[in-house]
Image: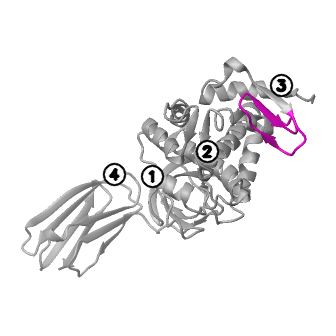
Amino acid sequence: GALIPREIYCKMAYRTFSKLVGEYPFAAEKYGHTQWGWGGGMEHQTNSFINSAGPVLMAHELAHQWFGDLITCGSWKDIWLNEGFATYMSMIFNEVDFPSFFRPTLESTLNQIVSDSTGSVYVDDTTSESRIFSGRLSYNKGAYVLHMLRGMLGDSTFFRGVRRYTNDAAVKLSFAFTDDLKRNLELESGKDLTEFFQNWIYGQGYPNYHADWYQNSKNWVKVKLKQTTSHPSVAFYKMPVTLLLRGASQGASFKVDHQYSGEEFWINAGFPVDTVIIDPDIWILSKIKTSTKLTAPAGDNNIKVFPNPGTGPLYISLSNPTDKTLYLTVFNSLGQKVYTTRKDTPGQDELFSIPATVLSKGVYFIEIRSEKSIKLVKKIVR
């Protein structure tokens, strides 16, 4: 189709940025471009120098009016506050105004970042110009950190937090450090982002994921989500992770709060599942995301009581429950009832425990029954 004039690109980005992060800071002075003979561009307050009139470069330099000119990074170590924001805002320009370009841009950015597992967003060597202006770290990984914050906090909270940052009297028309952005996002969201910033800004590398999963006869899916990290500076990334469960003709997404490697989640899919996809919309900076379907335990109402004999807590596992309520009763050798409890079993496999304090040394009988389908009496020795 016909080429869009450069001023139209600029107006589109101007409109999008003003809506999302606040009014253009220098509206009384307007905004312009000056063409220059060097590569790339250079932001100046109200007038950016650019070599070519491409929409991404124009959006990047315009974004610097907020992130670079209205608020300037307080040190070269914090340069990502300028360049990461400008890079991400140019991606958001694509997302809003040219949506078909957004996913490919996000994917290519991710792939460039994970091509190397070393280096932090926070600059560790300010004597090196190439390190300060690292395209992979200061620009792209800085941008992806913002993308992940947006995914964690949600669009509304994230952009309100950014507007709080751009209007913060402590940094507006002045200098900001990484902690200033963190402080504003925390005030807006009510969340403690210390661990996130420590891992993603000051740490190096990224996480990789693998999920082992199976589905029981009630269409509940058990997912064991494992994580490894690409660099020893970060032991684990606590992140919300979206799991897309797909069947032959339908799919559904579920978000889990992943707190440790090997954590298990039960998800009520409601339909037969043949594929589990981790982070389908690439909200997480990760290189490897694989899954393996395992064989589900055979049979309904598969009950195991363990350890027997034993001295600690007593555990009862139930696979493929057919009823919604389970009743557990423990009798001593004289037939006296010493413990009883009721458990809801909505369809997922269950693991119950009976405290060790309930069972002193001796012989007991445990009765497990449901409303209609389950009846088990088992001798246990303590």
Give the percent coordinates (x, y) of residue 333: 10, 75
For label 1, the SS is helix
Tag 2: amino acid: Leu
Q: Which residue is mark 2?
A: 81
Say which quadrant the C terminus sits in. bottom left
Task: Tell me which numbered mark, 4 or 1, is placed earlier along the sequence.
Answer: 1
Q: Nearer the viewer, residue 243 or 62?
A: 62
CA distance for labels 2 and 1: 17 Å
Task: Tell me which numbered mark, 4 or 3, is placed earlier along the sequence.
Answer: 3
Identify which residue is drawn at 56% across, 42% down: 150
Q: Main secondary structure of the magenta part?
A: loop
Identify which residue is drawn at 14% across, 63% down: 339
Q: Nearer the viewer, residue 374 or 13?
A: 13
Q: Which residue is mark 1?
A: 194
Q: Is residue 251 left or right of residue 54?
A: left
Tag 3: amino acid: Glu
CA distance for labels 4 and 3: 64 Å
- Tell me the mark number nearer the camera, choosing from 4 and 3: 3
Instruction: Tell me where residue 35 sits by quadrant.
Output: top right
Residue 220 visible in the picture: no
Give the percent coordinates (x, y) of residue 366: 20, 69
CA distance for labels 3 and 2: 26 Å
Tag 4: amino acid: Lys
Task: Return the mark for residue 7.
Answer: 3
Task: Return the mark for residue 324.
Answer: 4
